[in-house]
Amino acid sequence: MTTMARLVPGARLARVDTLDAYDFYYYARDEHAMLGHVEKPLPAWRLIYDDPQATWVYLDPRTGQILSRQDRGSRASRWLFAFLHSWDWTGLLSRRPLWDALLIFLSLGGAALSLTGAVIGWRRLGKKLRA
């Protein structure tokens, strides 16, 4: 435990969780997906520290290797960037046909919205040029 406490200098180790299943911040991806080449073994330990950055460290209990290190900012980035760009929610990743259908539906909706904006902009620009 002393070594674990030293992973984040100046911080107290607040909690240690054993993960037997993936959570929203530590999860495996398909090989072809973004970061799919990074191995995420289970079980893993999640160490939660009481530092100002609210650091979480994921460790392999067999080797002691640091698997992932996240702070409040990287956890926010996970939702604001990774989730919105790849829809890597664990509930959807395990139901692959549903993930594909949802992604196609949302992509078509985004394309339709973009096309609508381009048409409206083109018409408005055309009116200004003719005036």
Image: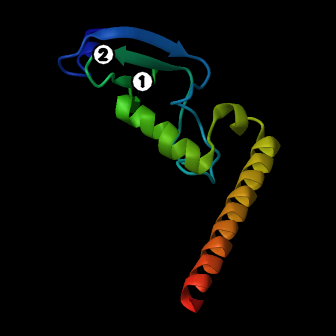
Question: Does residue 3 appear anywhere in the picture?
Answer: yes
| Residue in view at x 65 percent, y 46 percent | 30
User: What's the residue at 65%, 71% (across, down)?
Assistant: 120
Q: Is 57 left or right of 2, judged from the image as shown?
A: right
Q: Quadrant of the N terminus?
A: top left
Q: Is residue 7 above or below residue 35?
A: above
Residue with the most extreme bottom position = 130
Image-based side of 35 in relation to 9, left or right:
right
Q: Secondary structure at mark 2?
A: helix
Looking at the picture, which amino acid does disc 2 mark? Answer: Met
Residue at the left extreme of this rendering: 10
How packed is label 1: few (under 14 Cα within 10 Å), some, or many (20 or more)?
many
Quadrant of the image occupied by residue 4? top left
Q: Mark 2 = which residue?
A: 4
Which residue type does callout 1 highlight? Leu
Q: Nearer the viewer, residue 11 or 21?
A: 11
Separation of disc 1 and disc 2 at Cα?
9 Å
Residue 20, image x, y percentages = 60, 18
The answer to which quarter of the image holds residue 128 is: bottom right
The C terminus, quarter of image: bottom right
The label shown at residue 59 is 1
Q: Position of residue 130 (x, y in %)?
A: 59, 91
Q: Do the residues under discs 1 and 2 have CB atoms within 8 angstroms?
A: yes
